[in-house]
Image: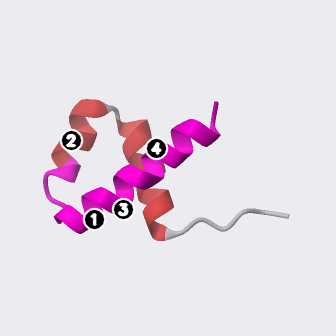
Amino acid sequence: MSAVLTGTQKAALVLIQMGRESASRVMAELSETEIDQVTAEITQARVGGR
């Protein structure tokens, strides 16, 4: 069974792969709500990926 990712989860994974400098430039363009959502997904991905 394949997992279906939300748009926010996909964005989080892309940002992780981009590296800190590039990801921070992208995140500077996001709203506060979007940053909160993506940051939560990044945290989940990193905790779940260990």
Q: Which mark is residue 24?
A: 2
| Residue placed under numbered mark 1 in the picture | 34
Q: CA distance from mark 1 to mark 4?
A: 14 Å
Rate crowding at label 2 as few (under 14), some (14 to 19) or many (20 or more) other CA atoms within 10 Å.
few
| Residue placed under numbered mark 3 in the picture | 37
Query: Label 3 is placed on what type of residue?
Result: Gln
Pointers 4 and 3 in contact (CB under 8 A)?
A: no
Mark 1 or 4, nearer chain start: 1
Q: Is residue 41 left or right of residue 20?
A: right
Give the percent coordinates (x, y) of residue 19: 34, 32
Rate crowding at label 3 as few (under 14), some (14 to 19) or many (20 or more) other CA atoms within 10 Å.
some
Q: Is residue 25 left or right of residue 4?
A: left
Give the percent coordinates (x, y) of residue 15: 37, 45
Pointers 2 and 4 in contact (CB under 8 A)?
A: no
Pointers 1 and 3 in contact (CB under 8 A)?
A: yes
Q: CA distance from mark 2 to mark 1?
A: 13 Å
In the image, which residues are magenta?
26-50
